Image (spheres, rainbow, N blue to C red):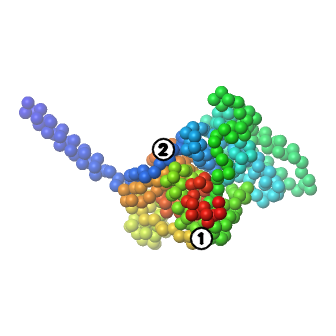
């Protein structure tokens, strides 16, 4: 009995030691998020090795719009949008003799244009991404290696006159890799065309506008955001940065989502699921590194030191002038589209937007990113939104 008591005591001591060890090993710099507002979204998708974030994020946006309006969940087809969009972009590139780039990227407006002019189909009305060339997900490496020189050869042709036959050949490449867009299909026992299916979804496509914020054009006017993937040249409403952020906040709080486009190349956008607008100068001193030594570190070493600060990482406070400078000097690039759908705070009180990505269930939060409001204010290029989600006083200034 005495031996059993001693063994029990040792077990209690050991348990206490393990508990202390586990407590001491907690990473107090890792954010613990508290959800403030979360709107409904559809499932996480994976664009894999394709530059189609614009299609995935914007169709995800419209899926959320449908969910909000009707309560119905749809999985809309990204490859339908890609097939039509790449043909249209090739035609524009040829028309402009190659002075409009032909690439995998696009904008949220491309998806809206497709819905308006071609309709849409559900995911299973076309071959699943990758399956036509023996993959399990989209992989555009071979596809664009074949298609890009084809388009460029026509666009840069020295012929005095070209035929329209090249479109037939390009359509064959598109259909061969993405699948042929259906003229009709059956969904839940009902026969549709892509346009009639679009009309059945309960969306009013006149409700959607694009917002940006740059001071090289007058505020409260519209202009074409000058980036290569904005090749259709749609107009965006230009509002001051503070009003841009009010629009996003109001949208989320009123139950809407936001189809966001912007820059994710900053060190603060981690592959673990965070987006923080690092104040590098302050962070450098907090990491115990002086300027001379900092500039000798590799990019990976710098990023490791910054990331190690966790929720204590200092952020810049963006201004309109900082946004403009980063746009003009190419620091801010239009390289990714995602879906803003919620607001959260960390244990330090820093506010973040909850963002649905299209890289599969990747990162610490299984496909969800938390981008600080400072990051979004600084690195937003533009976004698509339902005009009814915009505060009334701002809508009045916009004239809508």
Q: Whole-Å distance between the Cαs marked 2 and 1?
A: 34 Å
Identified at 46% across, 46% down, the residue is 365
Label 2 crowding class (10 Å Cα cut-off): few <14, some 14-19, many 20+? some
Q: Is mark 1 on a helix, strand or loop?
A: helix
Residue 9 image position (x, y, % from top left): 14, 39
Residue 340 location (% of width, % of height): 53, 52
Q: Residue at x 60, y 69 (%)?
A: 324
The quarter of the picture where residue 288 lies is: bottom left
Residue 325: which numbered mark, if any?
Answer: 1
Residue farthest to the top, as pictured: 189
Q: Determine the secondary structure under disc 2.
A: loop
Residue located 72% across and 58% down the image: 233
Q: Mark 2 points at which residue?
A: 366
Q: In this view, does 45 lie to the left or right of 194?
A: left
Instruction: Using the rendered image of the protein, determine whether residue 327 is visible from the camera's viewpoint.
Output: no
Where residue 363 sits: x, y (%)?
A: 48, 47
Asked if residue 61 is positioned above or below residue 244 in the image, the reply reads: above
Picture disc at residue 309: none
Residue closer to the observer: 135 or 122? 122
Total of numbered circles in the picture? 2
In the picture provided, is 236 more to the left or to the right than 246? right
Q: Residue at x 57, y 63 (%)?
A: 393
Looking at marks 2 and 1 on the same chain, the residue that comes earlier in the sequence is marked by: 1
Q: Quadrant of the C terminus?
A: bottom right
State the image quarter where residue 221 is shown: bottom right
> Residue 1 location, x and y as percent?
8, 30
């Amino acid at each position: 009995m005495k031996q059993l008591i001693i063994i029990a005591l040792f077990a209690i001591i050991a348990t206490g030691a393990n508990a202390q060890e586990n407590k001491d090993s907690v990473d107090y710099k890792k954010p613990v998020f508290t959800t403030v507002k979360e709107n409904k979204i559809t499932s996480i998708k994976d664009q894999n090795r394709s530059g189609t974030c614009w299609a995935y994020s914007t169709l995800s946006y419209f899926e959320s719009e449908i969910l909000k309006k009707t309560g119905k969940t749809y999985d809309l087809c990204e490859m339908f949008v890609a097939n039509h969009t790449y043909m249209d972009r090739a035609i524009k590139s040829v028309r402009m003799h190659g002075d409009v780039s032909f690439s995998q990227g696009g904008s949220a407006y491309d998806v809206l244009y497709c819905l308006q002019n071609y309709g849409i189909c559900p995911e299973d009305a076309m071959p699943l991404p990758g399956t036509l060339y023996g993959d399990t997900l989209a992989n555009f490496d071979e596809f664009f290696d074949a298609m890009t020189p084809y388009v460029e050869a026509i666009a840069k042709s020295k012929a005095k006159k070209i035929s329209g036959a090249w479109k037939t050949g390009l359509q064959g490449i598109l259909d061969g890799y993405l699948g042929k867009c259906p003229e009709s299909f059956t969904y839940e026992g009902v026969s549709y065309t892509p346009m009639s299916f679009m009309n059945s979804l309960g969306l009013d496509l006149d409700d959607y506008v694009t917002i940006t914020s740059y001071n090289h054009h007058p505020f409260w006017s519209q202009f074409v955001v000058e980036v290569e993937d904005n090749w259709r040249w749609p107009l965006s409403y230009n509002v001051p940065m503070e009003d841009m952020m009010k629009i996003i906040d109001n949208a989320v709080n009123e139950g809407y989502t936001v189809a966001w486009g912007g820059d994710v190349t900053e060190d603060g956008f981690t592959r673990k699921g965070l987006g923080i607008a690092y104040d590098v100068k302050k962070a450098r001193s907090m990491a115990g590194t002086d300027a001379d030594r900092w500039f000798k570190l590799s990019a990976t070493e710098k990023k490791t030191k910054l990331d190690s600060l966790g929720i204590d990482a200092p952020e810049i406070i963006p201004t309109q002038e900082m946004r403009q400078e980063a746009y003009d000097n190419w620091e801010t690039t239009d390289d990714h589209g995602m879906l803003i759908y919620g607001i959260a705070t960390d244990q330090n009180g820093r506010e973040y937007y909850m963002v649905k990505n299209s890289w599969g269930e990747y990162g610490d939060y299984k496909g969800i990113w938390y981008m600080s409001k400072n990051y979004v204010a600084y690195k937003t290029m533009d976004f698509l939104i339902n005009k009814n989600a915009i505060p009334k006083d701002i809508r009045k200034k916009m004239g809508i």
